[in-house]
Every structure is written in C-alpha cells, then in structure tokens.
Amino acid sequence: MGDNSDSPLPVVSYARISDDTEDDAHGVRNQHRTNRRTAERLGWQVVKEITDNDISASKANTAREGFQEIVAALPSGVLADGTRFDGVVVLNDDRLARRAADYESFVEALTEEPGRVFGDEHGEKDLYSETVEGMGLVGVVFSKIEARKTRRRMRQWHRDRAEDGKPPGGRRTFGWREDRMTREPTEAKLLADAVEEFIAGRSLNSIVRDWQRLGVKTSTDRDWTTTSLKRLLQNPRLCGYRRIGGQLVHDDHGRPVVGAWEPVVTPEQWQAVDALFRARAGHRIGSDGKPVEALPVDHREHRYLLSGILRCGKTKPDGTVCNAQLRVTRQRDCKHHIYACATKGRGGCGGLGRRGDKVDEYITELVLAKLEQRQSVTKDAGPWVKEAELERIESKLATLTAQWKNDQVTDDFFFANVRDLEQERTNLRNERARHAATTQRAARDTSDVRRRWNLPPEEGGLDIPQKRAYVREALHAVIVLPVGKGNGSRGNFNPDLLVPVWREE
C-alpha cells in the first residue's frame, strides 16, 4: 500500500458533479484540488484527472464514461491514453459510487492486482480488507437511499411551489426579469407577438430568422433556434400556469393553478398554441372522438406561395387524371415564375403549366375571402359548450380520489374507475384547447391579414410561410385544368380553370 516513500505512487483523481447535488460549476475544480492535497499527504502523485460532470451515480443505466474508463484500466494499470497509475483518489465514497453494483465492480477491478491504492479526504482505505469493503458497501447503500430521498424531496418541493403559485427556480426565463415575477417589457412584447403570429400560422423558423436579424438573444445570451423557441412557446408559464411531469398543475377543484408572476399571454392564447403543437404531433382528435387530418406542415421554407398545393388536372392517355404536384420553373423570355407539371421521369405528365403571378393573385383573393367568411361564422360560435361536462368529470375525480385517500373505497374500485375518468378528462381538455385555438384564430382581424399580405416582412408584412399557412388552412389543394389547344402557359388567364378543393368548415 502507500508507503510515503521518495518515489510517489501514480494515482488517478476522480471527480463527479451530478444534477441531484447542491454543488455548483466550480465543484469539479474544488474536488480535484482536494484530491491532489490528499494524494500529497499520502505520498502519492496525481497523474490524471478524470471527471463525470452533471451525471448522477444513483440512477440505473446512467453512462459514466470516466468511471467506466477507470474500472476498465485498473487491472492493467494503464489508461487508454497510455498513462500508468496504481490507484484512485476521490473526495469521498459517494462521489465514486451510489450503487452497490458499481462499487463492487470498482473494488474487484482495483484488487485484481496487488498493490493498488485507494483513498479519500479522510485518508487511505485498504480495499483488500473484507471489513473495509463491507463498510464501503454499507455506505453506498445509505448514499443511494439518501439520493432517493433527496429526489423525492425535490419533486415535492417543486410541486409545493407550483401549487402555491410560485415560479420555478433556476435562471430567469426569457420574457421576465431576474426576479422571475415581473415581465421584461421588450422580451415580453416579442413573446406575445410570436404567440399571435404562430397562432396565425407563421412558422417557428420564420420567427427565429426574424429574431436573429434583430439580434435578439436568449436569457443565456445565445442565438435562438427553432428548438429553443418551441420549448419556450410550449411552456404554460407564458399564461401563468405550471406543468410538472407533462401535466398542468391543478387545484383540488380541477382548475389550473395560476402563478403569482405576470403572464405574457392569456390562457386561451397559450391553449391555442398547445393545441397547434399537439395537432402537429399527430394527436389531433375530432369532436366525435375520431382522429382527423391535421394541417400539413412545411418542413422546409418554400419560396413560392403555391408550391405543392397546385396539382395537375390533365387527363392522361389511359383516362386517369395526372394529379402530380406542380413545380416552379423559369424561362429566359418570361420574368414571372411558372407553375408546371413535372416531367414523366419525375412522376408527372409534363403537359401543363400556368403563369405563377396570376395564379398566386387569384388564389390569394379566394383564400382571404374564405377566411373572412369563416371568421364571421366562428365569432358567432360562442363559448365552448362542454365546460359543464368537464367540471362534472373533474368533480367526480376529486371525490373519488378523496374517498380513496380516506379508505372509503378499495384500491381495486379506485383504479378500475379512475383511469376512464382521467382519459375522459384529458379528451375534454384537449377539445377545449382546440376550441381555444379556433377562437384565437378568429379573433385575429382578417382585414389586418389582408392589409399585411402585400407588405414586406420588415414592415410588418406576412412572409411566404405565414401566407402558406393561411392557404393550407383554407385549402386542401387547387386542381389546375388544361387550357385549349393553341394556348400556352402564358396565354390569357382563365380563373375557371383553377378548381379549389376547400377544407371542411
């Protein structure tokens, strides 16, 4: 073992910072500094520092690359980079392992060859001694128990704060000041506008590009991405709600708990955003309880209004309709873009084309007129008609849960009934969110959409993704019928040869 000779034993310093401890970012450096001092005191020399940062040792199936590297190298005493070592020094046992299996694998690897050393800030430990190994295992078990207790306390702490209407801890969220309660005016305005524009159909990518152009940064001073913006818009904190484990936090009466911080948007607006994300994830359910078609999502930014929406209506020699999507092409003697059917090699017939600017102008007017008509109908639709039904289900759930807690019903009876009630509640909540999305869309003045349609985006106008969202909301497709002989794609424009396929009301 360590003999404090003039030739110090080479050892590895191992440090671990996990997300279930109170250590800060400087903890790694502090651990290694303490380990070096321990090694010097014992007559050892640290030749390598290995760290597992922000990794828990108490959770199963957690990959700790540093720990595994040490265990794999201990029998030979040579690390992957060729560094020779004869032992390991750590801050204390719970930094090394919190699971008995991990501790046993470490001890087996270390003691496979004689002369290996191990120590922590309390001094050297002889792992070749069964007594010391047993004490270590006992310590690991208690550390694991304490880790589980800590996680349970943290989960309960978060839930208690949520039920009391307090904001989550940690760094501030974009849109609020450092106190996490007061709105930051500039950021809050950007967030509110983003919510409205997303409800209106603007893509996340389009909003992010606009923010990047304006130099807007996240609360951690990073560039915005579609992922970070999506995560923020999905957060019910925007309207004053909290979500834990994927579920909104509700009070005893089944109503969402409203936080004490200043909201950025209304609950109806956030529910509309949430419903849109759910629909895009493929979970949209119709009022009859059956899945319905969700609006198509553009996975890339198109440069033209009707790409992929126009379809060829020419009849092929076998009597079937071509139905291929029209693509945009350019010709040197034409300054306007042309929507044309793809060639036979690309699945089309190559026999139809139409002047793009005229088609865009005509379909735009049809769509705006349709949306204005739909808006007037939706505004008269009134409030969601199933609010009383949802309240009844939530009341039954609360009563059943209270009876179960008071041992008034058996476990079998409770679990046999609670699942159906919870599923019914979820379906009704989702339906309410979809109604909120529809109402929020109708609440936007379509006359303002018409005004903004032809303005450049930098002046508050709609960009192509926003315009396409309105078109797709109104239309399945537009069938383009062939013109008569002698008329090319740039002949006299005939709107009767454009057949819109409208979405159901």
Image (tube, helix red, strand yellow):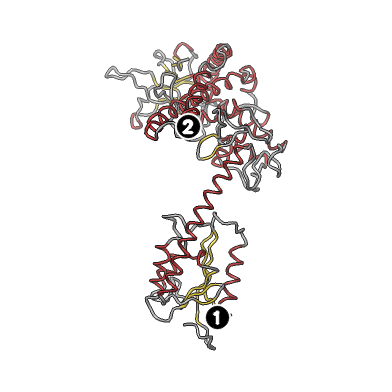
Marks counted in the figure total 2
Identify the element where label 2 is drawn. Answer: helix
Seen in the image, is 362 located left or right of residue 62? right
Query: Which residue sits at x=62%, y=34%?
Result: 238
- Which residue is rendered at x = 45% and y = 55% of the image? 59
Mark 2 vs mark 1: which is more N-terminal? 1
226 sits left or right of 212 in the view: left
Amino acid type for the residue under numbered disc 2: Thr
Residue 377 falls in which quadrant of the image? Answer: top right
Rendered image quadrant of residue 29 = bottom right
Q: Which is nearer the eye, 110 or 216?
A: 110
Residue 378 picture location, percent across and down: 55, 14
Q: Is residue 180 left or right of residue 37?
A: right
**Quarter of the view holding residue 321:** top left
Residue 182, numbered label = none
Mark 2, other Cα within 10 Å: few <14 / some 14–19 / many ≥20: some
Judge the density around disc 1: few (<14), some (14-19), many (≥20) Cα neighbours within 10 Å: some
User: Looking at this rendering, what residue extends furthest in the left direction?
Assistant: 318
Tell me the mark number nearer the camera, choosing from 2 and 1.
Answer: 2
Instruction: Give coordinates of residue 260: x percent, y percent.
Output: 67, 35
Query: Please, is residue 221 above or below residue 128 in the view?
Result: above
The residue singled out by tag 1 in the image is 42
Disc 2/disc 1 C-alpha distance (Å): 60 Å
Q: Is residue 455 above or below residue 157?
A: above
Q: Reply above or below: 44 against 478.
A: below
| Residue 85 in view here | no
Where in the figure is residue 438, as x and y percent of width and height? 54, 21
Badge 1 element: helix
Residue 353 visible in rendering: yes
Please give the residue where the numbered disc 2 appears in the rendered image. 401
Question: Does residue 222 sit above or below 186 in this rendering?
Answer: below
| Amino acid type for the residue under numbered disc 1 | Leu
